Amino acid sequence: MNPRGTEETGTTDNRCVGKVYLVGAGPGDPGLLTLKGKGLLECADVVVYDALVSPLILAMINPLAEKIPAGKRRGRHSLLQQETTQLLIEKAQTEAVVVRLKGGDPFVFGRGGEEMQDLLGAGVSVEVVPGVTSGIAAPAYAGIPLTHRGYSSSVTFVTGHESAGKYRPNVNWQAIAHGSETIVIYMGVHNLPYIVTELSHAGLSDETPVALVRWGTRPEQEELIGTLGTIVAQVEASEFEAPAIAVIGNVVRLHDILSGELT
């Protein structure tokens, strides 16, 4: 891969001379990083990376590249979103290959669409390199297929952590509860009591299986298995914390059958 060969020739005016690549790092296992993403890391001039990108993937970065942390964890922001975008714009004016390395997939609850929109608005050339999203990979590593002919023929992906400043929730949990047989919730641990209450009020049985998968695909991955009626108490008792994916639905019953084959 030689991204530099496709860049516009630098000029002395204010036009951007480089290109920003929004690269999905996947959920953590370095083996799930795409070949294209790996090639870009190896030839990058600058890499602006998220907090959840695994150290093994960061080790693939060109040793001569400038590495800038810009990750966001609840209550701990290295850079504000606007600062990150402005940084990418500035780096594209002086460097040929600027990689914005994001956990999972840039366009699945990763703000990649927002960043691309702002970059294009500033005249910066952008390319998206998709990544494996944790909502698919974490359940798979836990032995939970999101669809199965005997259990589920539909799946919904939803965020459990909406934008700050919203005066009311925008997720219609009533519709989510009845919209598909499997529900996958990103960033839902902090708001789990509220989510469980909403799904219960929507008519889901307290016996509905629930799985929480923490640090999915990494060596430290762990699962907490319960039901809609028990999972909140289990989280409190075990002090289970983010980052985690929640899977709700009968496919969770397959965990005990399939997870042993994955260990």
Image: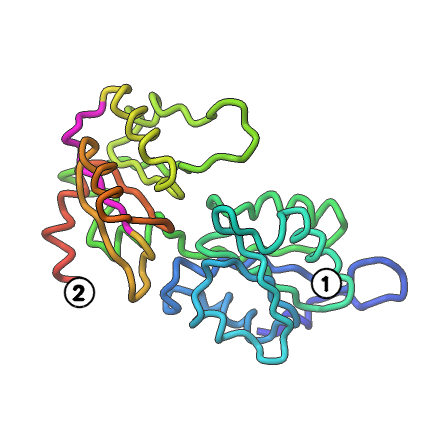
Compared to 98, does 76 lie above or below? above
Q: Which residue is mark 2?
A: 263
Residue 83 drawn at (x, y percent)? 68, 51
Q: Which mark is residue 91?
A: 1
Cα distance in 3D space between marks 2 and 1 = 43 Å
Q: How many C-alpha atoms fall within 10 Å of the one at disc 2: few (<14), some, or many (≥20)? A: few
Left or right of residue 147, residue 82 in this image: right
Q: Amino acid at mark 1?
A: Lys
Whichever of callouts 2 and 1 sits on the residue coming sooner in the sequence is 1
Q: Which residues are magenta?
A: 204-213
Residue for point 16% across, 38% down: 151
Left or right of residue 47, residue 91 in this image: right
SS for dot 2: loop
Does residue 152 appear anywhere in the picture?
no
Rendered image quadrant of residue 220: bottom left
Q: Nearer the viewer, residue 21 or 214?
A: 214
Q: How many marks?
A: 2
Does residue 76 appear anywhere in the picture?
yes
Q: Nearer the viewer, residue 106 or 212?
A: 212
